[in-house]
Amino acid sequence: MRKSILTLTMALGAFWAAGSAMAYDGTNCKEPGVCWEPKPGYPEKIAGTRYDPKHDPRELDKQRQAIEAMDKRNRLRWEHFRKTGKFVYDVDEIRG
């Protein structure tokens, strides 16, 4: 009795897993892994449409400025380490 319940439970679990794996996901794949398809009404070209993000060049430049500042701080830390042999994280301590 116990063995048959265990077998039935395993069979139902396998049936459920197989059913969910083969479920329709609502996409038509051109090839395996290429399943993106636009919603109806999505334009071929995005520039000039309401989907165009219109990024502000000043906002995009903030990342470049942050990376340059980080490189400058790291250069100061490295130069200080070469001179003294001591690593100092706070750059204000190096300058002061």
Image: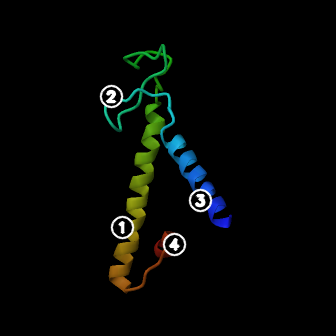
Horizontally, is 2 left or right of 83 in the view? right
Is there CB contact under 8 Å for labels 1 and 4? Answer: no
Q: Which residue is mark 2?
A: 30
Dot placed on the residue nearer the N-terminal end, 1 or 2: 2
Label 1 amino acid?
Arg
Is there CB contact under 8 Å for labels 3 and 1? Answer: no
Question: Around disc 3, counting alpha carbons within 10 Å, would you say few (fewer than 14), some (14 to 19), or many (20 or more)?
Answer: few
Disc 2 on helix, strand or loop?
loop
Is there CB contact under 8 Å for labels 4 and 3? Answer: no
| Label 2 to label 3: alpha-carbon separation | 40 Å
Question: Around disc 4, counting alpha carbons within 10 Å, would you say few (fewer than 14), some (14 to 19), or many (20 or more)?
Answer: few
Dot placed on the residue nearer the N-terminal end, 4 or 2: 2
Horizontally, is 31 left or right of 87 in the view? left
| Label 4 to label 3: alpha-carbon separation | 64 Å
Dot placed on the residue nearer the N-terminal end, 1 or 4: 1
Q: From what the image shows, is residue 38 above or below residue 75? A: above
Disc 3 on helix, strand or loop?
helix
Q: Say how many tags the image has.
A: 4
Q: Which mark is residue 90?
A: 4
Disc 1 on helix, strand or loop?
helix
Dot placed on the residue nearer the N-terminal end, 2 or 3: 3
Q: Position of residue 24 (x, y in %)?
A: 50, 32
Label 4 amino acid?
Asp
Horizontally, is 15 left or right of 67 in the view? right
Label 3 amino acid?
Thr
Q: Which residue is mark 3?
A: 7
**Quarter holding residue 31:** top left
